[in-house]
Structures are given as structure tokens and as C-alpha cells.
Amino acid sequence: MHTDRIKALIRKIKNSSISMDEALSALKNLPYEDIDFAKVDHHRAVRSSIPEVIFAMNKTTEQTLSIARAMYSKGKRFLITKTGDEVYNKLDIKEASFNPRAGTIHCGQPARKKGFVLVVTAGTSDIAAAEEAKETLLFLGSRAEALYDVGVAGIHRVLHHKELLNSARAVIVAAGMEGALPSVVGGLTDRPVIAVPTSAGYGTSFGGLTALFAMLNSCVPGIAVVNIDNGFGAACLAHKINIQR
Amino acid sequence: MHTDRIKALIRKIKNSSISMDEALSALKNLPYEDIDFAKVDHHRAVRSSIPEVIFAMNKTTEQTLSIARAMYSKGKRFLITKTGDEVYNKLDIKEASFNPRAGTIHCGQPARKKGFVLVVTAGTSDIAAAEEAKETLLFLGSRAEALYDVGVAGIHRVLHHKELLNSARAVIVAAGMEGALPSVVGGLTDRPVIAVPTSAGYGTSFGGLTALFAMLNSCVPGIAVVNIDNGFGAACLAHKINIQR
Amino acid sequence: MHTDRIKALIRKIKNSSISMDEALSALKNLPYEDIDFAKVDHHRAVRSSIPEVIFAMNKTTEQTLSIARAMYSKGKRFLITKTGDEVYNKLDIKEASFNPRAGTIHCGQPARKKGFVLVVTAGTSDIAAAEEAKETLLFLGSRAEALYDVGVAGIHRVLHHKELLNSARAVIVAAGMEGALPSVVGGLTDRPVIAVPTSAGYGTSFGGLTALFAMLNSCVPGIAVVNIDNGFGAACLAHKINIQR
Amino acid sequence: MHTDRIKALIRKIKNSSISMDEALSALKNLPYEDIDFAKVDHHRAVRSSIPEVIFAMNKTTEQTLSIARAMYSKGKRFLITKTGDEVYNKLDIKEASFNPRAGTIHCGQPARKKGFVLVVTAGTSDIAAAEEAKETLLFLGSRAEALYDVGVAGIHRVLHHKELLNSARAVIVAAGMEGALPSVVGGLTDRPVIAVPTSAGYGTSFGGLTALFAMLNSCVPGIAVVNIDNGFGAACLAHKINIQR
Amino acid sequence: MHTDRIKALIRKIKNSSISMDEALSALKNLPYEDIDFAKVDHHRAVRSSIPEVIFAMNKTTEQTLSIARAMYSKGKRFLITKTGDEVYNKLDIKEASFNPRAGTIHCGQPARKKGFVLVVTAGTSDIAAAEEAKETLLFLGSRAEALYDVGVAGIHRVLHHKELLNSARAVIVAAGMEGALPSVVGGLTDRPVIAVPTSAGYGTSFGGLTALFAMLNSCVPGIAVVNIDNGFGAACLAHKINIQR
Amino acid sequence: MHTDRIKALIRKIKNSSISMDEALSALKNLPYEDIDFAKVDHHRAVRSSIPEVIFAMNKTTEQTLSIARAMYSKGKRFLITKTGDEVYNKLDIKEASFNPRAGTIHCGQPARKKGFVLVVTAGTSDIAAAEEAKETLLFLGSRAEALYDVGVAGIHRVLHHKELLNSARAVIVAAGMEGALPSVVGGLTDRPVIAVPTSAGYGTSFGGLTALFAMLNSCVPGIAVVNIDNGFGAACLAHKINIQR
Amino acid sequence: MHTDRIKALIRKIKNSSISMDEALSALKNLPYEDIDFAKVDHHRAVRSSIPEVIFAMNKTTEQTLSIARAMYSKGKRFLITKTGDEVYNKLDIKEASFNPRAGTIHCGQPARKKGFVLVVTAGTSDIAAAEEAKETLLFLGSRAEALYDVGVAGIHRVLHHKELLNSARAVIVAAGMEGALPSVVGGLTDRPVIAVPTSAGYGTSFGGLTALFAMLNSCVPGIAVVNIDNGFGAACLAHKINIQR
Amino acid sequence: MHTDRIKALIRKIKNSSISMDEALSALKNLPYEDIDFAKVDHHRAVRSSIPEVIFAMNKTTEQTLSIARAMYSKGKRFLITKTGDEVYNKLDIKEASFNPRAGTIHCGQPARKKGFVLVVTAGTSDIAAAEEAKETLLFLGSRAEALYDVGVAGIHRVLHHKELLNSARAVIVAAGMEGALPSVVGGLTDRPVIAVPTSAGYGTSFGGLTALFAMLNSCVPGIAVVNIDNGFGAACLAHKINIQR
């Protein structure tokens, strides 16, 4: 529609139905929508790698459902994060599938991109964040492999998988408590490592803050850190790295 | 030397001077050094992309100098971070050059890699971290471009450079105070964005903590965050992304 | 009544039934109530712009209802904030209307003042604070306009509305997560900007603290900050600015 | 110059030297500078009320001096905040004057605006922030009055000046330690109150954090809060309120 | 029993069945229990002013009930704090009475001591802590007066009662939010002031921490501060001051 | 002067040169100064027990000296706290004496009051706060006794002095690190205990915060807590308790 | 199986079916599993003193049950910590017994080791952590003695038991609130003292943080500190000390 | 002297110059000093394993010197921690030797105890704390071995030394930044591990707090944690474990 408005303006200039000054003014004040339309286009291009995702926390079940249905009717695909079976049970879309460990519901997945992202966890309590990352990666179009429960208390567990670490395009490491695993992984591979602190733990784990700060202070340089339990964000970053031209 | 030990073991097995059980035991207890030697090799391979760097904070001038000289004599190249002119003035290596804004001294730089990393700052106080990132990128072998002082108080400044943002392989954004620039940049580009909180500010800037937390909470998904003032770490991550096969 | 006491004192002075010294002493010790009566009067004058409001958090439903009824019977108008449908359902006052998004119940509204206050939000999770502000503005007698969901992840959304921003008497900006929107808005307008950090977010959003500190550290000078989720307080300040003579 | 480019485009459309599609594309990609040029203009309009100010903290003496000289040569006026006598002694501009209590150097002041802003302090340690506010107000073109050392330990001191409080266009209250004065002032006047927490105090004053949080939690609704020791920011807000049309 | 052991020792010394050295050694190693028995006596003397009180938080209803019954059967009196109607409804002791605002159940009260303690609150949300203080004072044997809802937003309310403040033996001031009232009260009276921060408020009130720190930083010297919501502790201190010989 | 204004008003009423309404209005608006004059009187009465004290932290040597000289010329007595030998060496008042451990200079002391306050420290690092308390007590007119270095690592040290503890009118306990001594002292005596956290310690002592919070959480009910290193405040409170009628 | 692979390699070397270089290469790349197999063996040896324990927090009832059943079928013994009666009621293993105060279920216990560990608490609220420690000690094979409710408010209670303290191999001290008991105990014994901060308390107890920091700052050197409420960890450490050869 | 008082009492009992009741009373009130004298003796016994140590932080050079001289004249041995060359240069005791890396001066060392304590560091910045621990161990009479710079960024470095780890009586691990090394070490050995967080690092290392919390949250159960940079405390604990009978 914006295109139509611009075309109309061009026609008016062409047939001189507006003066130079009027044209100048019209162009300077060319509605932002038009410029933004380009931006939106570009934005949509961005979205083709990171499409719209529904963050269900702080939303009512009804709000979440109505957004999901709208997205489904438009493009047959969506991803809901931080959700539960209450939403899933009320969702009347057959193609949708629910991952209770991840707290995600997805529908429709693009073709897989070349490389794969490895998702690692220190313990079983970190699997929720890891699964959220995995579901997001799949939804975005990246392949994903999992390597769970290889925390530093038994260092040999991760040493086993050095080759797997080095064949990934990026490595996501989710860890709670002391958050040490990303440092160890980062010392074993030259792949970009993305650390996800998780809220697993109690007392001075401070809901994940201790793991977060440990990761930011890693003695291995160049580890990317995201917010606590933010498997989704880690996956978005890993996907951007994976699809790097 | 480890090789010699292993060879000797092989010879003993070959000429049956040890029994099957003895050989089995010897191999199971094969000194870690040997395995580790391989690990060291691999480690060195890692280092070819992120070579040894001297972090001068908490080191005396003498300690820093002696490490730099040792590295110079071995490989003619080194990078010193978080340093000052006191070290530089006493350093008797002609090829070394000092960047006072970055607080770095480098010597020897590899050939440049294909893409470039864009280093952006919100204000002039963030340039120290940005220059540290730039020097590190150059040292690691990545090309680097700078876009300084384009903070959100005058949003048009960064809007001007959307194309530059989108032609980089990765974008490092250094910002102190409210730390908002990475979110705005992340909304304008689909390149991986690495946010460096800086300690610029006073009062409730808490030496960079406010910027750090703001960046971790960005409404743009997939922003990588590193420690406060850690331009070096951001550069390591950006370089890994840039050289991605 | 205080007036009567003062009148009696005046009469005594007049007819010399008390000595100069007695009069002096009586006046110096003139009960505070009397002075305070004036203060109360003035206080009431203040209240004519910021009338009594019922803060329902920490109050039982019964307490809230009884205060609302008392205010209704006295002046036919009241505003309840941080409340819910439990209170509304038990409230037997027809004129009262409930805004569930704002968590407010109001009854009776004065004539609207000249200018309008613009209430902006970064995301949908910030609308509760914004609606509380809007309801409060209406109750106080200011006009209010809303501009929701224009966060910095898509910077073009707020750029569209520069003229709206500049035609308001004051702008309230509610944002959670990284709290960056007030800085961007403050860079686009010369109107007084009042920032409301909201508790939207998780992990290191710290229930709104990160947004709060980001706003206090805005690189745009002169942004007013209020407590987390305090749409009510922001509206009181905006109203005072709006009715400025 | 942007205007010239747009005019050229209009001419091309007019004389059909470019096709409809080419015109459409050119308009959609109309350089941001043009739009931004308007923005810059408007931005400059904003600056006419809040002109460029030099924040000297984190700047070397030389950097501060060179910016000040540049601004002086352009417009004969500037304001430096968070500075000291080292800068002043090296500054070779006669019209400049130094306020050591405020830590400011200013040069050139506009005509005073109609109303005045009252700057209040709880104690003598809060005067630095208050003087910074006063100097900034004068520089911006607002009149300013001071009422110092009227903290709540002797509540009668501020009660004396109710009329002064009520005749101001806005009231800035600087207080450290328990930060209680803005609440008391806010209860005595209907003027917009801007609270500046100061770093005066020791132990649990946490460099002003306790005062900051106390102010954000004021039982008087509608108090604007700025960063710790940010007299400059408070003045910018007060000035915006004062010049409100 | 300890007495018996000591008596036996005395007899042995008396009839010389142990030598001087043996006696010396025995006495030096006299079991602590015996000494402690005296200490317990003295301890009980202390308790006659601060008798055993049951802190019900973290205790099950059954645990609380059984301790209360035991105390009742021994001395016909007890005080339960931080409790609720669930405990009260199951308590089969007629003399016991429940104060729901205080969250206390008491039974049996001593004769009242000479002076009285004044319990002041800033707002209605602070009454729980104040009532806990009052109930404790009564239980300990001090008289108590209440002055509620005289916060600093309307400073005249507390100014009214200067004489009341000055006729108390000690003043307890409970306040949440910005915690400013103790400073104002402390500036109006020379009585010992005990400040109780309360958890009333939201956002940056941090569950009472802001009020606590404000009170510790009072510009009025000599204000005693206790833990958040600790009306019981404040009352114990006030009682000790009241019964001072 | 205020008296003159009131007398003039009385005369006008008396000779009917103003009407009843005018008189009423004049009285209602009777300047606060007059009332406050009384308040100031009362305030001075308060000050006779807690006279003006000079808090030298945040003051220049010259400021401190000029206030001290002014107070000396008026009343021949003063107390300076948080000061050092630089001030003392420039102070030209013979009667003044300097306590370097306390960081105080005093001049002139009143007659001693009946009871005494016991000042206890856990370690030698806490003596600064204790000496500040002692100097303040002496200046205010209370007697003071010291019991230093009796921390809980050797619990027998404080057990020795139970009688001393119980014969004081109040006990001030200064302790850093874990801040445990006030609890132990509070369990041994029924005297009011005032706890002063000190900034002694390192790492997680957080400059006295750990001791402060430990004291606020004492398992002994009724311990008064003051700000970190605030020996002055503790002494003011102890003095108020000591002179209790 | 790894053994088989190594044996095959030895055979190949022996019969020269591979060259020296091939043998060297094969040995250097000897799969980690083999080395790790030894590590696992050693690891298992470690586990014989600290066997696998099920941490039930963050696990569903079903997850906990299935792990317990698996461990039971393998070795007839397990310990579940941070659990409740819901798990116990569904657990179909007769030998298992539930300690509700500890929140533990255990099954099967080894023979007791020589010395005993003393578990001390300050108050009754600390018993949960203490019982968790006791159950863990028993499960690991250490003997355990309990000494509860001997907090510093009545210092004589712990003084009674000096001999018991000194006859233990290690002393675990659980305390909440001000966390002072470990210091007092550490001053009375030369046994290793392990401090467990507990989350008992309210307000500034910060869920055990205050006790934790107090313990880390103990004036008694050499106190071991573990996480808040971590009776399990304290027991593991005490057991390691107890079984010290 | 106390002995004399007790002897006199014994004599009185013996010659019946006091009655049974008087004797009983006298004994029950036997002054604490006497009992405490015994306690002091025992205390001294404790000190024979942990002798008096001089903590120089917060002490002037003169204070430190005079205590050291006094201890030298009494027992020819002492240890000073947290000190520097200023103290050492003024110390006129030949036998004393200074360890600048440790910040310690010691004089006189007992015979070495059987086992040894291994002191491990993650990086070179952690060596100060490690050396303080080593010096303290030697002074207390334990043997000590060092294993420095084996942080988790190169995990093979610590894997090399598994046997060394397992042959120690206890392992002290000093680490700053993310504090991960104690977890890795704890997973490789069954020896008691004592973790020392160090203040090495910047930004969110928070002067060692991040390492401290990481260590408290170790996924390896039973790790002892001490205060930040507290090598001395770690050594005291390790020594107690080492000399365990």
C-alpha cells in the first residue's frame, strides 16, 4: 500500500500537478511508514532467520493461544517458549507438538541448515534451558545435537567428546550452580561457545546469578554469555553464527 | 621425549620382553603427558587462532616485560592488554607499538582474514574497550572497522550506518551508562552482535553492572554479552565467528 | 472549631481580659491544630490536584471497600490502584468502572485539563503500568494518549511518532527488561520524560531493577525516574507538569 | 545539500529521465541523511533549550580544554561539569568563571526565563550537587534560588519556607544519608519536586544508594528521581518544566 | 544433683580424704554444670524482665501449641509472636487472647511499670509491627500508647503530638517505604527513639531494606535500629530502657 | 523580633485597628518563625544533652577549624569527630585535646552523670569506633568504662566480666568481622546493649555490612544497632538511656 | 571392551602387522575411554566413600522414585536428600526409612567408621540442616552425635560440652540468623569445624546470607564453610576428614 | 592468685570455719577467673597447633613490629601475614625471613608433621593467597607442596597431577575469576579440598565474590570454603586435618 502512495506521488510530480516546493516538502515528510516499509522488509528478512516467537511468560493462556492461532493462519508455523501443557491442551492445531522439558510448543519447521549446533549441559537440571535452545534451533532451521550431564565433577565425561565439540559450528553450554563447564569446554574447542547460566541450585546460587558471573569471568577468552535460563537467546545467537555466509 | 618413551614401549611389546598383561597395564597407565602432548598440540592449533596474550593487570612491569621478551624471542609477536606507557617505555623491542587509548602494546600481526568486524561505541568513554577489541582483532588476524559515538541519545547517528552494520561479519558494541545501544543495533542488523558493557558512568552505573544487566535483558534475542570492559574477550569471540569456515 | 478558639482569644485580647504577656504567651503556644488547620486547608488545595487515592496492595478487600464507600459518600469520586476484580465485584457503586489491565477502579472524573500526557510502552508486558498511569491521569483531570509496544528492538516504531511525542505536555515511558526506550524517546523530544521501570522480564531483570538503573543512567539528561511499576507516581508528576500555570 | 539531491530527483521524475520503478526505488532508498537532516534540525532545536554540556569526569584535562575552546570559538558559551581548578587554571578564556563548590566552569548565559527553580539541600554535604544544579539552570536560562541546610533533623527549618516552596516553578531537593527531605518538601508543596540523592554519608549510605531508594519509595506520590549526585540532570528536567509553554 | 556432687566434694575436703592438691584440682575442674546452674539462675533473673516468648514463624501449628501449653501449665503466661488464627483456634486456653493485626497471642500480663512507651507508625501498613511491639510491651510489663498514621507526607500530623512524644520513656517508630519518620520524630524529642523498618512497599523498597538503611543513616544521632518487621525486638529494648532503675 | 511582631498584632487587636476577620486571618497565618522560635528553644533544650558536634568527614580542614573556633568563642566547648592530626595541629585552642585512636578532638566537658556506660570491643581493630563512643560519652556528660579485645574466639575473656556488664547503665559493643560479640554480651546481661558494626575485616566483611546484618539478626532480642563505625551515634543513644529520669 | 581393543593393538604390534609409526600413532590416539576407564575406576573408588546420592530438589516425584529404584536394584542402598513424604509414601522399598526433619530417605548403611562427627545447632530451626548432615554421615559410614539448641544467646549451654567437642573427629555447626555459634565452638576446640549457614530467620537474614558471611569472617581461623542449608556437603567433608588414614 | 583464693577456701572448709551451706554457696559462686584459668591453659594447648599469628592489615608498622618483637623475645618464633617490605626492612631480627609473594614474614619453624598439604592455583594471580597458605602451613608444622597455574582453561595441566593430588593429606585450591578449579580438583581426588577464592579478576569478579559463590555451589560435594584471599585460614584448616590423630 505504501508503494501505492509513493507511486501516486511520483505521478503527481511527473504530471506537475504539484509544485517543486510541494514535491520537496512531500518527499522530506515522506511518511516514515514508507521508509520503514523498507525497514520492515529488511526486518522481515531478518525474521526469515529469526521468525516471530511467542514468549508465553507473563501472558495469559488465552493471549498466548490467540497469537499462536493468528500466526498459524498466516504462515502455518510458530514457536511458543516458556509455556506449559495448559496452553498445549487448549491448542486446536494438530501439527503443533509440545516439548514439556523445554517448555515449548512448535509448529512447522524449515529445512535444516548445513552445520549443527551442539547443546551441552552440566547436569540434568540444566536440560530445560538446553531443550529450549534445541527447539529454537530446529525452529530457526539449524541442526542440533545434544550432549547432556557432562559436568565438571566428572571431568572425563566431557573429555570423551572433544571431537564432537570440534565438529559443531557453535557450542551452547547450559550450566547452573558454579557454572564451570563453559570454561572447560572453551578450553577444549576453538568453536564459538555460548554459555547459558541456569537457575538450578539453591542458597548462594542466587537463582543463576553465581553461574552467570562465573561465566562472564571465564579464564577462557571469548565466551558469549546470555541471560539466566535464556536457551532461546543462546539458540538465536548460535543460529546466526551457523548460517554465517 | 614422550615419543621416545612410547617407542620404547612398542619395541618391548614387539620383542616380547614384556608379557601381554604387563603391556596392557603399561598402556592403560600410559602417562597423561603423552596423551596430553597430543592435547597440547591441538591446544596449540587453537592458539594459532587465539595466540597467547599477556594480561598485564595484576602483573608488575617487570613480570610483563619478561613475558613479552620471551614471547618475542620465540615467535616475534605478542599482545599485551590492560597496560600503560610505563611498560612501553621500558620495552626494548622496536617493532612493538603502543595504543594508549586501548591500553595495549602489540608486536607482529598476521595476514588479515576475509571479512571485517565492526566495533561500535555509544560514547567517547567507551572507546578504551573498543580500541582494546580492535587491537585484539588485528592481532588475531581479523580486519576491523570503527564506528564511534553513536549512542541512543541521538538515534539518527546509528541509523545512518545500517549498511555498514549489515556488511560486517560480526558487530561489537561497547556501551556504558544505560547500555542501550546493543539493543538498537541488534534491531537494525542480522549480524551476530557482541555487547561489551563499559565502566563509564557514575552513581548507579555501578562500574558497568547496570550496562551489563541491560545488555543481558535486551529485547533483541541472541545478543552475546561479555564481562565489563572486556574488549579483548569480545574480539576473541568476533574473530572465532569471522574465521568460521 | 479551631476558628472558634482563635476568635475567643481575639475577643479576650480585644476586651483586655488578658494581659499583653498572657496574650503573647497564648499566641506563641497557639495550638498546632490551628496552624495546621491552615496547613490542612492548603493541603486540601494540593489534594484538589492530587486527590486522595486508595492503594489497595497490602489492604484486605474489606478495608479497601470501606474506604472507597466512605470516599464515595463524601465526594462521589475515588480511585483504587493495585486492585483486582475481587474488590470490583463486591463494590456496590454503579458509577465505578474497573480497568483490569491497569488494576484500577475509578469513580467520577473531573473536567479535562488543556494539554495531554502521552503514555508510551516498550512492550505489551509494560501496559499494566501504563494503564495505571492513564487511569490516574484521567482521574486527576489530565488528558491522556497511549502509544504502546514501540520498543527499541524495532526502532522505526517510535520514530514514526515524533510529532505525537512533541505535542504532548509530558511523556511517560514504561519499559522493563533493559529499559532503553526512555533514552531513545528523550533523544527525540524536548518534552519532560518520565520513566517507569516495570517488573517485566526474568533472570537478571531483577524484577525491574535493571530497567530502573538503566533509566537513572540515561545518556539523555533530565529524565525523571519513579519506582518500579509506579505508573501512579508517574501520572501524579505528569499531571503536576501539565497543570503548570 | 540534501535538499539539492531531492530537488534533482524531483526534476528527474518530472522530465521522465527515470522510470516509475527507478523513481520508486530511489524514493524508497531516499538517504536517511535527508530524513535525519530534519531530525538534526529538530535536534538542534532541542539543544537550544539544553545546549551541549561538557561532562569532564573520565576526560583528561587536555580533552576537556580542547572541547571547551572549540565550543567557545563557535558560540561563545559552554558549561563544564564535574571539573576542578586544574582545568580552570589552564583555561585561557576570560569570560569563563569557576564555581568550586559546584565543580563547574561556565561561560556565557542566556536571558533568564520567567519563573524560578528552587534548589534545596538537607545538609552542607549536599551543596555540591545543588550548586551543580544551580549553575546548570543559569546556563540553560532558568532563574534559580537556593535554600540550603534545612534537613529533617530540625523540621522547623523547612517549615519556615513553605511560601518560597510554593512560589517556585519546580523544586530540586538534594539530600544524602536517609534522603528524607524530598518527602517532607513534597508534602508541603504542590510544585513538581525533583529529588537528587547525594553520596554524602558513610557505611550503609552506600555512596548515595540508600538516599536514592528512599526517594523512589517516597510516600508522597509524583516525586521525580535522578541519578546519585546528578544535579545536572535535575536541572535539565527542572528547566524543561520551567519553560513549559 | 550438681548440688549433691559439690556437697560430696566439700565433705571430702572436710574429712581430709583428699589432699590439698587434689582438692585444688577438683575445684578447678568443677563441672561447668554447677557454675552454669548459677548462671541459669541469673539467666532466669534476666528472663523475669524478658520472659520466654514463642516465635511461631518456622514452627508447625502443633509445635507452637505444645510449647504454649507447656508454658501455660508452668506459669500461666506466655506470648506467641508471628502467629495466626489457625494456632489461636486450636488453642484450648481461655485466658489467651489473639491480636490479629499484631499476629500475637498472649496469656497473662504482669502489673504495669511506671512510665509508658509510645509506639508510632508512618502508615497503616506499619501497624502490624507496631501492634507486635505493643503486645510485647504489655506482656513484659510496660505501659504502651499508640500514635498511628502520622507519616512525613503530612508533616503536621506528627507535629501535633510533640508533647506526647516527650512524655514517653521511649519511642518506637515503625515505618516502611522511605523510612523517614524516625528522623523527624528524633528531631522533635530527646527520648530514646527505636526505629523498626517494615516490609511495607514494593519495587525498590526491597522488603524493608530501604527503610532499614535510611534509618541507619538518620541525620539525627542516636537512633536505635532493629531488624525488619521486628516489633518484638524493639519492644524488648524499649522495655529495658523503661525499667531502667 | 518575632515577639515584636506578635506584640504589634496584639496591640492592633486591642485597639480594634483591625477587624475580627482580619485578626483571625493574621493569626492563622502567624509566621512559622514565631512558633518555630519556641521549637528552637525546645530544640536547644534537647541540645543541652546532645550539644552540637562537628562531623569532620567531607569537610575541609579550614571548614572544620572555623566551625570549631566559632563554637569555642560561643560556649568554650565542642567535639569534632572523624578528624585527624592535620586539624588538631592547626587548631589554636589550648584546652582542646586530641584522641588519635578515636579520631576526635574535644574541648570542655560537663560534670559526669550518675551511672556509667561500658564500651566493649571484640578486637583491637574495633577500638577506633569504641574510642569515638567514649569521647562522645564524656563530652555529653556520661561516665564511660572500657573493656577491649574480648571477642568470641576466646569466650572466657568476656565471661570474666559479667559483673562489670551488669553494673553499667548501658553497654556499647563494637565488633567487626562476624559481629558475634553483641549476641554473647546480650545473653550475659539485662542492660540495654547497643551494637556498633565496624569496618574491620576484608573480603566478605563488606566493610562492616556482614557485622551489621549479624547484629540485626541477633538471637538475643532487643539489641539496638547503629550505622557502621558509628561510635558517635551509639554514644548518643547510650547517653539518652543513662540520663533517663 | 576397551581392554579388548588395547589387547588387539598389542597383538598387532607384537606380530608386526603394523609399522612403528602406525603403532606410535595408534597409541597416541588411544581412545580416551581407555584412560577414562581407569579414571572411572578410580572415580568409583572415590564413590565408595561418597556413594551416589539423589538430590530430589528440582526433580519430580517420579524421577526421584525411578532413580532410587534403579540404585536399590543395583546395590540395595541409596540416600535421597531434600525430599518429603510424597516420595516416601510412593516408595515401595521396605528397608527405606524416612527422616522428615532431615528431609531424607535412606536405605542401607555401611559399617560405622572409628571416630564420630559431632553435629551442633544454634537453634531448633537449624535442625533440618543438622539432621540432613547426620543422615548423610550415617549413610557414608561415619558415626554421628548430635548437640542441638546451644546457641550463643545462652553461652553456658555450649560451654557445658567442651569435652564432647574435643572428642569428636570433626564438628559440624549449623546456625542461622547471626551465625555466631561456629566462632564460639571454634574457640573452644581444636577439632576441624565445618559451618553450615541455615536459612532460618527473616528480614536481613537474607535467607541465610548473613549467617554465611558471618561464618566466612569468623575471628577463629580455619573454619570450613559450605553453602546455605547444605548439611549434605558438610557431612561429605566431615566424613572425608573422619576416614583420613 | 586465683589458686591462692581457692586454697584459702579449701582450708576454711577443712577446718570447718564455714558451714556446709556457706561452702556450697562459695563454690557455686567460685569466680569465673579460676575456671577460666583452666580454660586459658587448654586454650594454650590449642595454640600449640595454631600459635599466635600477627595479622598486619589495619595495623601500623610500629604496632606490627612491637608485637613481633614481643613474641620473638618470648618464644623466638612468630608469623606476620598481610604485610610488606616496609615492616621487614625495619625488623631487626636476623632469623626472620620475608616472602614478598605471600606478604608474610616468619621466624622459627617447628619440626614437620608426617603428611603434606598440596597448594594448587588456577593462575599466577592466585599465587599470593597460595604462598600465604604455604608459609602458614610451614609455620604451623605441616609440610607443603605447590602446584601452580593449572587452571581449567587448559584442563590437561591438572589431569597430569592426579597422583600428586591423591597423595596429599589435604588440598588447598586458590582460584579467582570463575573459581572453577576446586570443582575439577574435587572430582579428581577423594582428599579434603579447601577452596580459597581470590580477588584476582575485574568487572563482575567483584573482588572475589564470584569465585566464592562458585565454590560454595560446587557440584562436587564436601568442598570447604574460606573467606576471599584467606590463604591463612585455609592453611589452619588443612593443618588441623593433617595432624588429625
Image (cartoon, coloured by chain):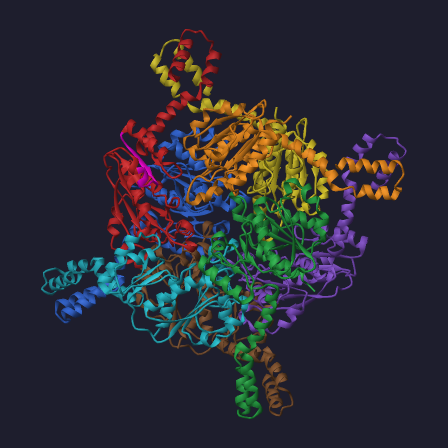
Chain colours: A green, B purple, C cyan, D brown, E red, F blue, G orange, H yellow
Residue D86 percent coordinates (x, y)? 57, 65
Going by the picture, which residue comes out furthest to the front?
Answer: A94
Q: Is residue F117 left or right of B33 when viewed as pictured? A: left
Within the image, what quadrant is residue H72 found in? top right
Residue at 35% from the left image edge and 65% from the top image edge: C136
Along the line of sight, the residue nearer the viewer: B100 or G31: G31
Q: How many marks?
A: 0
Residue F27 percent coordinates (x, y)? 20, 65
For the question of whether residue D136 can be seen, the reply is yes
Is residue C114 depicted above or below G167 in this figure?
Answer: below
Is residue H217 depicted above or below C211 in this figure?
Answer: above
For the question of whether residue F141 can be seen, the reply is no
Q: Is residue B101 left or right of B205 when viewed as pictured? A: right
Along the line of sight, the residue nearer the viewer: B148 or H144: B148
The magenta stretch is E76-87
Residue D16 percent coordinates (x, y)? 63, 91
Is residue D24 depicted above or below C113 in this figure?
Answer: below
